[in-house]
Image (cartoon, rainbow, N blue to C red):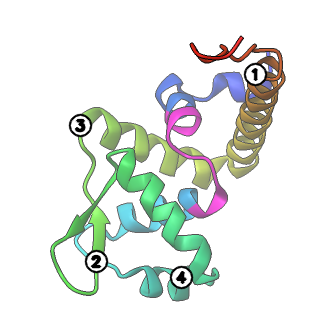
Amino acid sequence: MSGTDDLPEDVRALLHEHIETYEQLETLLLLRRERYEQWTSEGLAARLRVRGELIAPALAGLEASGLVQAAGLTPTRLAYRPASPGLDAAAGRLEREYAERPILIIQLMSANAIERLRTATLHTFADAFVLKKKGKDSG
């Protein structure tokens, strides 16, 4: 049994399915802690001390995952608004686990990244062997 196996299942699933980068993790945790605030990407970048160009894709991923939601303001502001109580509960457990055992969370994120890379590589390799169908007029 690896050390990450004793993390709660919903935390492992949340990290596997919705959190791909350290910027997403830190952004999610900040937005969750300050759930009643609405943030611009520039404000988040400054608060997290991360380059702005890293925050925009992190926010886009979190929004697509149903963890944050954009307010209809200009400039766009985002806030922690999980799409379901289950996502909120998993994010809460993730926050606790990361506070208590950050190394395990980072190890699991690294393992997930390696798995995504291997899967993408296998798909690319398999696609190299797919024969293209000839057009109806050629051949």
Between residues 52 and 93, which one lies in front from this camera angle?
Answer: 52
- For the residues labelled 3 and 4, the Cα–Cα distance comes to 27 Å
- For the residues labelled 3 and 1, the Cα–Cα distance comes to 39 Å
Q: Is residue 85 left or right of residue 64?
A: left
Q: Which mark is residue 127?
A: 1
Q: Earlier in the sequence, mark 3 or mark 4?
A: 4
Q: Main secondary structure of the magenta part?
A: helix
Give the residue type at disc 1. Asp
Q: Is residue 40 left or right of residue 124?
A: left
Q: Within the image, what quadrant is residue 111 found in?
A: top right
When the figure is inspected, residue 13 is found, relative to residue 49, above or below; the finding is above
Q: Earlier in the sequence, mark 4 or mark 1?
A: 4
Density class for disc 2 (Cα within 10 Å; few <14, some 14-19, many ≥20) is: some
Q: Which mark is residue 45?
A: 4
Give the residue type at disc 4. Ala
Segment tinted magenta in the rendering: 14-23
Question: Can you identify the residue that label 3 sits on?
Answer: 85
Q: Nearer the viewer, mark 3 or mark 4?
A: 4
Q: Which mark is residue 77?
A: 2
Q: Is the residue under label 4 in contact with that under label 2 (CB below 8 Å)?
A: no
Q: Nearer the viewer, mark 3 or mark 1?
A: 1
